[in-house]
Amino acid sequence: MIYTLTLNPSIDYVVHLDKFVSGQTNRTTSEEYFVGGKGINVSCILAQLNFQSTALGFTAGFTGDAIEKGLAELGIRSDFIRLKEGNSRINIKMKAGEESEINGQGPHIGEEDFDCLLRKTDTVRAGDTVVLAGSIPRTVSEDAYERILKRLEWRDVRIVVDATGPLLLNCLAFRPFLIKPNRQELSDIFGRELSDLSEIEICARQLMKRGARNVLVSLGGDGAVLLAEDGNVYCSGVVREPVLNTVGSGDSMVAGFIAGFEQTGDYAYALKLGAACGNATAVSPGLADREKISEILGRL
């Protein structure tokens, strides 16, 4: 089983405008609603690839109801902890020439609530995959991922971490199967801009020395590079189409890589499918569907 964890899921409200004028009433030209959150995005793409997953995390209020209903309609199993107070957050994605975001805070998650999540991870078995994705909500301790990983230690579980900065670095001691920084996130970790592929490889190897088994670096329009535990470096390009959406592209790449490796155990194919999923989402209005993924995969 594949488990995805989204501590602070959302309803993403995407609004399109011809232009945005501050201080005035602005009217949309179109709008969409999506169930959001990095782990949830991974589950959504896995479903497009015919892989079942279980979405874990916290929900609250009427927006929490909408999140759970939305996932059920997509055929995705969820096992959220229902909080007694507050509402799951609404994130506003405004597209008016350029893309802007306003992200909500989300509900309060108490220590008892988090302990309940830790107990839920006891159902994870050897051979399962657990995806820890996104930031830590303000009401949860900064060592949340470490506490989860300690709970999963010695169970022969594949751990995937898609996080940034210290949150990612603190997970390396648990030898995650895969981490996926993008170029900017890798640059931020090492305190300098990384433009040359050789520099990116050197920095990715440093993360492997610190515990990561495989490091997948997404490079935007330049594709992706994978430093794998088999000792090889794999590269993937992109299919050139107009970029319509940057939200969820990295999550889609993670999902494709997981599915590709589950199918074949082959790092080159896992990277190719991951790149296809990320590329397909980038050129779609929202998360990619299976038809677009299949089309892009055939062109890579």
Image (tube, rainbow, N blue to C red):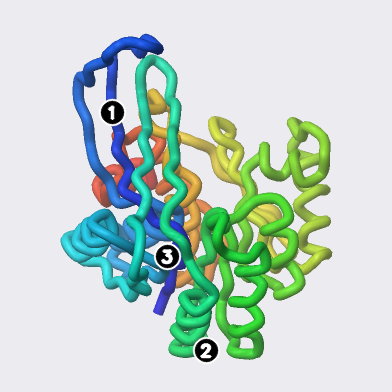
Instruction: Give the farthest residue toward the left.
Output: 73
SS for callout 1: strand
SS for callout 3: helix
User: Which quarter of the image is occupied by the N terminus?
Assistant: bottom left
Quote the CA–CA distance across marks 1 and 2: 43 Å
Q: Amino acid at mark 2?
A: Ala
Instruction: Give the farthest residue toward the front.
Output: 85
Number of the front mark, 1 or 2: 1
The dot on residue 259 is: 3
Relative to 89, residue 197 above or below: above
Number of the front mark, 3 or 1: 1
SS for callout 2: loop
Residue at horizontal 74%, vertical 31%? 195
The dot on residue 98 is: none
Residue on which the image places disc 2: 126
Q: Amino acid at mark 1?
A: Val
Spot occupied by residue 121 in the image (x, y as percentages of width and height) = 48, 83
